[in-house]
Image (spheres, rainbow, N blue to C red):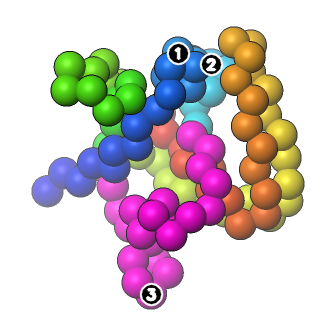
Amino acid sequence: MTKTLILPLSKKAFEITGTNEKMFELRNYSKWIESRLFDKDGIPKHYNKIQFPLGYSKDRKIKTFAFRGVYIFKYDKKYTFSNGLSFEVKAGDYIISFS
């Protein structure tokens, strides 16, 4: 059975996702994202695919990749991308790997 993780993106994030510059997704810790990534015992959920829709509209563009896993940041870091997108992560936030 194929399981797909769906994580909507903003326009700037969507533009560079899947490029050599950004083959990962960053998410700040929240109960919502934790519930998507881990079961109630804290064990990572298994997904085959990850989809990144552009926003929430019905006719939105979608990028699909193979899900490679989730990792928890152990330190604070700031990412700045070529299109001006900037993202700060802190220890306990998530990096989601895909290809």
Q: Which residue is drawn at 38% across and 25% down?
A: 54
Residue situated furthest front in the rendering? 57
Tell which circle, 1 or 3, labels the residue nearer the N-terminal end: 1
Question: Counting residues from the N terminus, which is met first, the one under dot 2 or under dot 1?
Answer: 1
Front-most of residues 11 and 73: 11
Percent across and percent down for residue 67 are 41, 45
Residue labelled with disc 3:
41
Amino acid marked by disc 2: Asn
Q: Distance between the residues labelled 2 and 1?
A: 12 Å
Could one spot residue 17 in this view of the protein? Answer: no
Residue 46 figure quarter: bottom left
Q: Which residue is drawn at 38% across and 29% down?
A: 55
- For numbered disc 3, what is the local secondary structure? loop
On-image quarter of the N terminus: bottom left
Q: Name the residue under label 1.
A: 15
Q: Earlier in the sequence, mark 3 or mark 2?
A: 2
Is 62 or 56 nearer to us in this picture? 56
**Nearer mark to the viewer, of 2 and 1:** 1
Instruction: Residue 77: say if magenta.
Output: no
Q: Residue 32: say if magenta.
A: yes
Q: Name the residue under label 2.
A: 20
